[in-house]
Image: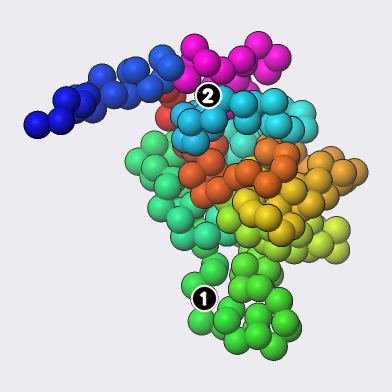
Amino acid sequence: MIDYLRTPEEIYRRSFATARAETDLGGLPPDLARVALRLVHACAMPDIVGDLAWRGDVVTRAGAALDNGAAVIVDAKMVGEGVIRARLPADNKVVCTLGEPSVERRAADAGTTRSAVAVELWPPYLAGAVVAIGNAPTALFRLLELLADGAPRPAAILAFPVGFVGAAESKDALIADTSGLSYLTLRGRRGGSALAAAAVNAIGGESP
C-alpha cells in the first residue's frame, strides 16, 4: 500500500499551513489577504499574490452584497459548481446563462463566442450582484462594453479569465476602466474557474 496522508482534516490543515508559510501576504489589507490565501490554496501557486490587482474595498463591498442577498453571476458552469452554496450567507442565487437555448444560435449569427452572448443576458441580474468570471476573456470584455453602455452596475467583479488569447488584455481593460468599478483580478494569462469560485467562497464566508 502506498504511504500517503488520508485524513481529510489533516490534509486541509497541512495544506493551509503550507500556503500560509510560503505566501507573502504582508502587502495586502487583512480582508484581501484572507481571500488571497484561498486563491493560493486553490491553485498551489503562492507567486500569484504579486499579480493581484484590485480597486478599493472590493472584499467589503462584495461581502456586503452577498449578505444582502445579491446574486452571484458566473460565466461558466464550472465556476458555479465550485461555489459552495451552503456557505453563501443569504441563500444567494447563482446565475449562469451560458446554457440558455438562444445563446449558441445568437453567437453563430453574431460571429462571436457563446460566452460573450451569454453576458448579454446578464442585465436583469446585474444590479448590485457579484460577478465571478473564471473562464472566458470575451465574457469580461463584453461585460465592460455593456457597463459602458449603461447596463446596471454590479457590486463587485471577481475577474479570473484564463488563456493565451485575450485573458491578460481583458483584465488590463478592467484595471484601466475609469468608471469606478470595484474589482479583484489577477494580471496576466493565469486564472480559471477554481480561482473565481475560490474568491466567491472566501468572501461568502468560507474561512481557511
Q: Name the residue under label 2.
A: 37
Q: At 86% across and 46% down in the image, what residue appears?
A: 177
List x then y, in percent, for residue 182. Answer: 74, 39
Q: Residue at x 72, y 82 (%)?
A: 111
Report how many numbered discs are placed on residues in the image.
2
Q: Which of 60 and 184 is in front in this view?
A: 184
Image coordinates of residue 153 in percent, x first then y, are: 74, 51
Left or right of residue 164: residue 22:
left
Q: What span is colored magenta in the figure?
A: 19-37
Tell me the amino acid under the disc marked 1.
Answer: Glu
Above-or-below relation of 50 to 105: above
Q: Is residue 28 magenta?
A: yes
Q: Residue reaching furthest front?
A: 1
For marks 1 and 2 on the same chain, the one whose residue lies earlier in the sequence: 2
Name the residue: 64% across, 54% down.
163
Name the residue that disc number 1 marks: 100
Residue closest to the eye, 61 or 164 = 164
Query: Neighbour class for label 2 at 10 Å: few (<14), some, many (≥20)?
Result: many
Residue ID at (79%, 52%): 169
Kindly report the secondary structure that dominates the magenta region of the rendered protein.
helix
Is 188 drawn above or below residue 11 in the view shown?
Answer: below
Q: How crowded is mark 1: few (under 14 residues within 10 Å), some or many (20 or more)?
A: few
